[in-house]
């Protein structure tokens, strides 16, 4: 379905202006947006609320192999090299890991997401497992952020190069999980090759934030306990509030300080570990809106355009505009859930669910 028309209530452009009309797609690209007062659904492949598909800027797909984990502290669950996740990944057979990640990618699709950025543990083994899982799922794009095997304090240049040959960039577990020389060498190698660099920082406290900032990554993940000064470094931030709540390091309205972050830099949104949360970005948006921001438009931006900006793909994705890829999400505004809605943005962010989706396209 490369050439088609969708219509209805369109969240148009980078400001998500609500218009009524049609979006025309040719060869997977948006070629025209026509404003019309009356929409004829017979002319459309689908009609309803027309919005950009969702982007998930931080996942860990590998721990799809362990779900329903007990409530526990952050270190017990995910700290390398002996956290629950890392022990499970070391024991997982290649085929088991691939199948679990493949299922998660299918879940991303049915929840309206067409692009994910994944922190890929396990060195080249982990990267290759994800590439194998991705191959049959054509509508989902994954930006793989690889890293050397966890718990090592040295970096083998050939291993980094092998990872970077096939990965979008580096996803570093933390600025203190390797020696300063090792992490510096790893990031310098990525920079030399023009690769993306992301680092977890400030998830449990702020003690590792300054060292992470000093490495000048392309984005920081979590920053749950960042100070105003640290936020004002200007480095883009991806927050994962549902994950923080599960691991006991976050609190509604305060940590992470999303409102302050949005005043200083670009802030995106991710679902984090699959073992802790589903990949459902609708759930993430609802939680952020109700527990933190009370600003639905900003939350929608975080899950779409801001994530595209952080990942460097906003020329093609993140909003509905002529020339961009037709990565579109059509929502049934007459569903039992959304019937009678008067504020489209509020309802998409706070109320919409995956079962309200009529059509998902990925022009990329």
Image (spheres, helix red, strand yellow):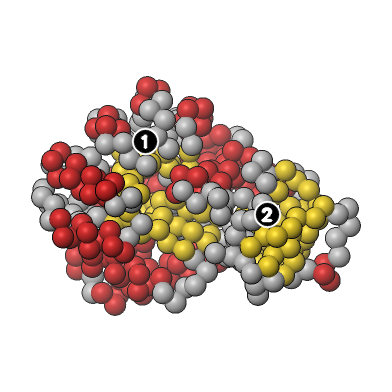
Which type of secondary structure does the marked residue at label 1 adopt? loop
- The relative height of residue 361 versus residue 246 in the rendered view (above or below) is below
For the point 35% across and 70% down, the residue is 131
Residue under pointer 2: 322
For the point 59% across and 65% down, the residue is 363
Q: Nearer the viewer, residue 59 or 274?
A: 59
Alpha carbon of mark 1 to alpha carbon of mark 2: how far?
A: 35 Å
- The relative height of residue 361 versus residue 192 in the rendered view (above or below) is below
Q: Relative to 317, is 358 on the left or the right?
A: right
Residue under pointer 1: 223
For the point 32% across and 47% down, the residue is 197
Q: Relative to 117, is 16 on the left or the right?
A: right
Q: Which mark is residue 326?
A: none
**Residue 36 percent coordinates (x, y):** 86, 54
**Residue 227 percent coordinates (x, y):** 37, 25
- Quick check: can you spot residue 340? no
Of badges 1 and 2, the one in the foreground is: 2
- Sequence-first tag of 1 and 2: 1
- Residue that extends furthest to the top in the rendered view of this protein: 229
The residue carrying pointer 1 sits among few (fewer than 14), some (14 to 19) or many (20 or more) residues within 10 Å by Cα, namely many
**Residue 216 percent coordinates (x, y):** 31, 36
Q: Nearer the viewer, residue 82 or 211?
A: 211
**Residue 309 percent coordinates (x, y):** 50, 45
Which type of secondary structure does the marked residue at label 2 adopt? loop
Q: Nearer the viewer, residue 270 or 91?
A: 270
Quarter that holds the C terminus: bottom right
For the point 41% across and 55% down, the residue is 117
């Amino acid at each position: 379905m490369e050439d088609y028309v969708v219509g209805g209530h369109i969240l148009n452009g980078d400001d998500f202006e609500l218009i009524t009309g049609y979006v025309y797609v040719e060869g997977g690209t948006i070629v025209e947006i026509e404003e019309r007062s009356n929409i004829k659904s017979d002319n459309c492949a689908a009609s309803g609320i027309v919005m950009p598909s969702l982007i998930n800027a931080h996942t860990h797909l590998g721990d799809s192999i362990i779900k329903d984990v007990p409530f526990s502290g952050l270190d017990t669950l995910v700290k390398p090299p002996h956290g629950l996740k890392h022990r499970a990944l070391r024991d997982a057979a290649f085929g088991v890991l691939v199948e679990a990640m493949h299922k998660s990618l299918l879940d991303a699709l049915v929840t309206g997401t067409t692009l994910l950025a994944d922190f890929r543990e396990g060195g080249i083994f982990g990267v290759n497992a994800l590439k194998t899982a991705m191959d049959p799922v054509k509508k989902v794009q994954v930006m793989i952020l690889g890293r050397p095997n966890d718990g090592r304090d040295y970096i083998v240049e050939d291993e980094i190069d092998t990872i970077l040959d096939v990965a979008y960039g580096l996803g570093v577990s933390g600025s203190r999980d390797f020696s300063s020389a090792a992490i510096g060498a790893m990031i310098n190698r990525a920079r030399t090759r023009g690769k993306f660099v992301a680092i977890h920082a400030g998830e449990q406290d702020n003690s590792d934030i300054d060292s992470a900032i000093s490495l000048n990554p392309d984005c920081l993940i979590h920053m749950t306990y960042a100070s105003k000064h640290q936020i004002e470094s200007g480095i883009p931030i991806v927050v994962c509030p549902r994950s923080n709540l599960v691991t006991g390091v976050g609190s509604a309205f305060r940590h992470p300080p999303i409102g302050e972050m949005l005043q200083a830099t670009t802030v995106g949104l991710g679902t984090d570990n699959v073992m802790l949360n589903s990949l459902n970005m609708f759930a993430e948006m609802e939680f952020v809106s109700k527990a933190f921001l009370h600003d639905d438009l900003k939350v929608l931006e975080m899950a779409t355009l801001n994530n595209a900006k952080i990942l460097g793909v906003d020329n093609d994705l993140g909003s509905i505009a002529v020339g961009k890829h037709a990565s579109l999400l059509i929502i049934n505004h007459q569903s039992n859930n959304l019937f009678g809605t008067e504020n489209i943005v509020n309802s998409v962010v706070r109320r919409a669910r995956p079962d309200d989706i009529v059509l998902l396209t990925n022009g990329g």
